[in-house]
Image (spheres, grey):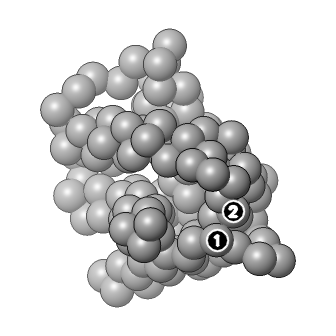
Amino acid sequence: MLDELYQQVILDHYRSPRGRGHLANPTLKGEGANPLCGDEVVLELLLEGDRIIDLRFDGKGCSISQASASMLVESLKGKTVAEAEATFEQVMKLLRGEVEPDPATMGDFCALAGVRKFPVRVKCAALPWHALEEALKQL
Ligand code: ZN
């Protein structure tokens, strides 16, 4: 039942991605590729001070990678860089199975926990987050 619900969350993000596209003048850019699956994600961030005031992603690939990118964009808009890094850590722990999904604090990210049983899919889900990490490293 829960798995089915999570599937729907992923398909919803895949079919109606939040923030797909490009920014006119991004402050930071990060890219990630997962050759095993053919996933590609480009992430663009617009910063004002230490706050991410806008962000977009573009890319192609499987539903997991693109849904994960959509969730990233939706969750980080308006967050500070420190908050974005904390979210990154939390999602990585979730994907590694170090924390259990908690809908109260993780929202849609819980759906990503379903990939933990499939190591190849973990790479798909983590891809946009590695693009974020790469972008934030330029700070
Ligand atoms: Zn993939």
What is the secondary structure assignment of the residue under circle 1? Answer: loop
Above or below, 1 relative to 72: above
58 or 136, which lies in front? 136
What is the x, y in percent for residue 17? 73, 56
Tell me if label 2 and label 1 are in contact, CB under 8 Å: yes
Q: Amino acid at mark 1?
A: Thr
Q: Give residue 27's mark.
A: 1
Q: Residue at x 63, y 64 (%)?
A: 45
Q: Give residue 46's mark.
A: 2
What is the secondary structure assignment of the residue under circle 2? Answer: strand
The quadrant of the image that shows the C terminus is bottom left
Above or below, 116 relative to 66: above
Q: Quadrant of residue 46?
A: bottom right
Disc 1 CB within 8 Å of nearest ligand 1 atom: no
Q: Quadrant of residue 130?
A: bottom left
Q: Give residue 3's mark.
A: none
**Callout 1: 10 Å neighbours few (<14), some, many (20+)?**
some
